[in-house]
Image (cartoon, coloured by chain):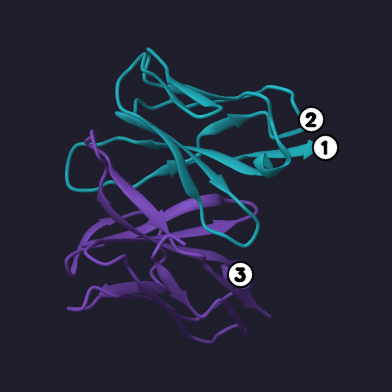
Amino acid sequence: GQQLNQSPQSMFIQEGEDVSMNCTSSSIFNTWLWYKQDPGEGPVLLIALYKAGELTSNGRLTAQFGITRKDSFLNISASIPSDVGIYFCAGQAGGGATNKLIFGTGTLLAVQP
Amino acid sequence: DSGVTQTPKHLITATGQRVTLRCSPRSGDLSVYWYQQSLDQGLQFLIQYYNGEERAKGNILERFSAQQFPDLHSELNLSSLELGDSALYFCASSAPIAGGPYNEQFFGPGTRLTVL
């Protein structure tokens, strides 16, 4: 099945550090989304991006929609232990009747207090 | 709590068997999506229903089928199960997101299927 390329695959950082992860695709998307998944839970939406070049923040999280529409990045500033989890990017081609999501391969984030 | 419920939470069965996974969307959401999450394939879209009708199909095997009932709950039926079908199965439902064209998808807690 189709998956977006997401990097890094995992990150082990100290509390207070900033984190950056990115996602690339061979296809153009009209919407980029970033989700977080905690163990035993379903993904939870963090940020949604709708326009090429758009930069959006949600608290300590900042994400950007790449100009080419084929990439996106997520930054987390001043990480805290509860940031631990798996982060997924997702793209939505849009148009038509479906909102199906194509997910990235995920970035596992571990934060040491 | 996303408001999406899925049952059962865990399911252990044998190869060749058939199982049914159930999903209740958030109140008012008309769209239901099914996703499969496995270690080797990641999160993969399976199928979408909107108000009882199939809207889109993804990487869903012919052995799998789904339906959405008049009360909007959905069931995913997996038959002739194989070891490789072991995975987490998520249901999501959607509603329009404020200020955006995207219908935010709310994910349920998932059903962990183990095929022995």
Tag 3 residue: B86
Q: Residues within 10 Å of mark 3 (few under 14, many from 20)?
A: many
Q: Colour of chain A?
A: cyan
Where is residue B47? Give x, y as percent: 33, 60
Where is residue A80? Give x, y as percent: 70, 35
| Chain of residue at mark 2 | A
Circles 1 and 3 in contact, beta carbons < 8 Å: no
Q: Quadrant of residue B106?
A: bottom left
Residue A112: assigned label:
1
- Compared with A53, B50 (above or below) is below
Instruction: Tell us which disc is closer to us: 1 or 3.
Output: 1
Q: Residues within 10 Å of mark 2 (few under 14, many from 20)?
A: some
Q: Secondary structure at mark 1?
A: strand
- Which residue is depicted at the point 64% across and 75% down? B114
Q: Is circle 2 on the same chain as circle 1?
A: yes
- Compared with B37, A82 (above or below) is above
Tag 2 residue: A13
Q: Quadrant of residue A51?
A: top left
Where is residue A89? Give x, y as percent: 50, 36
| Chain of residue at mark 1 | A
